[in-house]
Image (cartoon, helix red, strand yellow):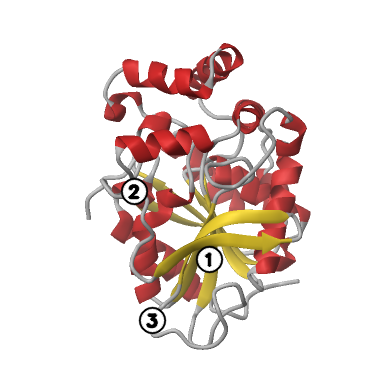
Amino acid sequence: MTRQATFTPPPGARAYPLRTTRGEFAVVDSSPKPESGPGPESGTASGVKGVALMLPGFTGSKEDFRLLHEPLAERGYRVVAVDGRGQHESAGPVDDESAYAQRELARDVLAQAEALGGPVHLVGHSLGGQIARAAVLLDHSTFLSLTLVSSGPAEISLSQQQRVKLLRDALAVLSMEEVWEAIQAMGPPEEVGGPARGLGDAEQLRRRWLGNSPAQLHATGRQLCTEPDRVDELAAVPLPFHVLSGAHDDTWPVAVLDDMAVRLNAHRTVIAGAEHSPGADQPLPTAHALADFWDSIGGDTHTA
């Protein structure tokens, strides 16, 4: 598979607004074939091993998981990738940062899992991992497991904090369009990274960026730079944990993720040839690692 892809849902998947008690959230939803049982907004269909709810990272979106849908469907899993509040195609206030407090975003995740019929396997990439952790700490009863993908125990590395500060400073004085133009002027996407790099063409990535709420970016950027270490608190939760990352990561060093996995007594996977976005860099090994972990749990390990 190539890293270049479009924002079109993969074969067998559909995009729609998931209705929850916290509002509607844009999702891409795929199920194993042949399908049977209830429709895509219901609980687990007959013959489906389980449901995975996937949360994207900072400046990312549900499309970041596009290359995981098909291989996970082949392993029997329904995948629901979501745009969080104020992210890409999910609506949110443009100037009210309080709407994006981590607890509010965690409550959104609980509502999404409930709308899917729970319990679900929860997967969070980067910022999405820290939001997923907050949701589990609020109420773990809706989840079968938690997988943290390239998501560390506390604040991001100093170099990444500097990048986030630069972005937040720019957002304070420039429009979203002007910030995008400034990002493009910095160099090729593979060197600049961030919102300019992803599974889509330049125009799709631009539209995704413009779909984000500035207040959401301000609030979640601050969270990434100030997040406390909550690993011991999480370790006390009776759920199976999985820490998955690439072989290199400059947002949280791999050694930091190794240590977090030990503290959580978590299953640990390092994807060779991948960096901060293993689902995009090496989708097949990433999908197989996720499915192997879920298969090892089965469907009856949930502890309420």
**224 vs 145: above or below:** above
Estimate the spatial distance between the alpha carbons at disc 2 and disc 3, rounded to whole Å.
23 Å
Q: Badge 1, how many Cα within 10 Å: few under 14, some, many 20+?
A: many
Estimate the spatial distance between the alpha carbons at disc 1 and disc 3, rounded to whole Å.
16 Å
75 sits to left or right of 149: left
Tell which of 196 and 232 is nearer to you.
196
Tell which of 19 and 292 is nearer to you.
19
Q: Secondary structure at mark 1?
A: strand
Residue 52: mark = 1
Q: Secondary structure at mark 3?
A: loop
Estimate the spatial distance between the alpha carbons at disc 2 and disc 1, rounded to whole Å.
17 Å
Q: Amino acid at mark 1?
A: Ala
What residue is at 69 percent from the left and 36 percent from the top? 93
Which residue is the extreme one toward the left? 2
Q: Amino acid at mark 2?
A: Ala
**212 vs 8: above or below:** above
271 sits to left or right of 99: left
Residue 29, image x and y in percent? 49, 65
Nearer mark to the viewer, of 1 and 3:
3
Residue 234, image x and y in percent? 69, 51
Q: Quadrant of the N terminus?
A: bottom left
Residue 135, image x and y in percent? 70, 52
Say which residue label 3 marks.
Answer: 33
Residue 78: mark = none
Q: Secondary structure at mark 2?
A: helix
Residue 280: mark = 2
Nearer mark to the viewer, of 2 and 3:
3
**117 vs 266: above or below:** below
Image-quadrant location for residue 75: bottom left
Q: Amino acid at mark 3?
A: Lys
- CB of mark 2 within 8 Å of CB of mark 1? no
**87 vs 228: above or below:** below
